[in-house]
Amino acid sequence: MKWLCMLCGMILIVGILLSFRNDNFPYELDMLEVNRIIRYIENNWYETNTIQLPYSPFMPTFVEEGASLHVHIQNRDTMIPLNIGGYNMGTIVFHSEVADTFILMRERFAMIFYIQVALLAIVMVIFAVYQKHTIITPFKKLESFAAKVAAGDLESSLEMDRKNRFGAFTESFDIMREQLAAARENERQANISKKELVASLSHDIKTPAASIKVMAELHQAKRGDCNEMQVIISKIDQIDLLITNMFSATLEELTQLKVSMSEASTVELAEDIRAADYKRKVRPFSLPECVLMVDRLRFKQIMDNIIGNAYKYADTEIEVAGSFEDNSFVLTVRDFGPSVSDEELSLLCEKFYRASNTDGKTGAGLGLYLTAYFLDKMGASFTITNVNGLCVIMRFPI
């Protein structure tokens, strides 16, 4: 704004100075030349008895006595009466250039005015373009960016231009957006961690609760009808139902459960399988030795689910075997109970799906869903077949 005012002031001052230059204005009347002309006319009159005007740059004109001088008066000409021998012969008129000067000045003033207006208009247009580029456009970007942030869009970044006066301001706005996005992401991760913890604890508690129920039922079978054992079994069923409901509600909002891979030998995995067989229905087995990349905690959950399902729906012996095929370690777990129909096999890993043979059995339809999910995160494949019972096949990359 300061430079704009200075430039406009300079244009006005230069215009005023050019308007009052007098280098093109007519010269003033020379009185010596006027006296010379009068003397010449007087001398010539006595000789020729006629009025003759000599050449002069002032171009004098003789107007006889009685003729109208109105035009000359309007033109502001210089008029000198001519007296010869005491008689008024007429008037010598020296043409005045005042009117011409006025016209020239008016034309000059008009030209300078138009030039000044044009220059000021150009300056204002340049200033408007500059303001639009440096103020209005960046401000509109800030306005649009603020609207996006207010609407919750924290992914769109704000383009920064350090050359304009809003450069540092836009940078601060974008840093604010990044901080808000980081805070939102931290909040999201914290919520996911809480849900993961609830889901993990809920599912992990179900297995020991089921073991307690089995042991209570065995104790009741040995001792006969026992009210205390019946109360324990009833409370365990209540706990199982509450845990299932809490886990199901959490899982519906949960995007993923974390899987942390580490090296584990098949010897360690065999111990995890035996630990999951609390009813001791798994036939003696041994696994070929190798080292796999698995999550031991998730593997224990997988075996709890598979063996627990065999207990619940087959109630037969369980066969476990391991082998190597095409750079993979293949682990199979098979029961010898009634299987499900071929149409239902592809649906067993769907969330909350329960087959037709589950009537009267407790459960939420999440065990095989989580099993398939964990194995996929560990890079292993998972299939279920009907071969003299239900056979679960897991392939771990070596």
Image (cartoon, helix red, strand yellow):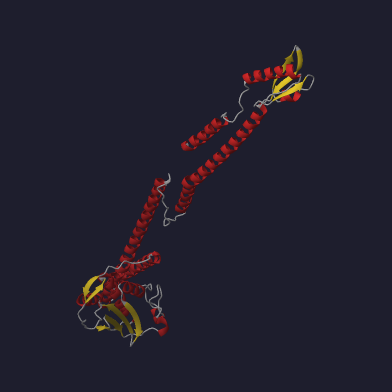
| Residue occupying image coordinates x 35% and y 56% | 186
- Is residue 249 depicted above or below 145 in this figure? below
Residue 27: quadrant of the picture: top right
Q: Position of residue 224 (x, y in %)?
A: 27, 76
Q: Position of residue 190 (x, y in %)?
A: 34, 58
Residue 349: quadrant of the picture: bottom left
Considering every residue shown, the one lying at the far front of the view is: 47
Considering every residue shown, the one lying at the far bottom of the view is: 388
Tell how many labels: 0
Front residue (pair 367, 375):
375
- Is residue 5 depicted above or below 286 in this figure? above
Q: Position of residue 195 (x, y in %)?
A: 35, 62
Considering every residue shown, the one lying at the far right of the view is: 66
Left or right side of 381 for 137: right
Q: Position of residue 84 (x, y in %)?
A: 74, 14
Left or right side of 105 for 282: left
Front residue (pair 55, 77):
55
Does the rendering let one see residue 386? Answer: yes
- Is residue 234 depicted above or below 326 in this figure? above
- Is residue 66 depicted above or below 140 in this figure? above
| Residue occupying image coordinates x 65% and y 31% | 103
Residue 393: quadrant of the picture: bottom left
Image quarter (top left, top right, bottom left or bottom right) of the C terminus? bottom left
Considering every residue shown, the one lying at the far top of the view is: 86
Does the rendering let one see residue 231? Answer: no
Front residue (pair 133, 111):
111
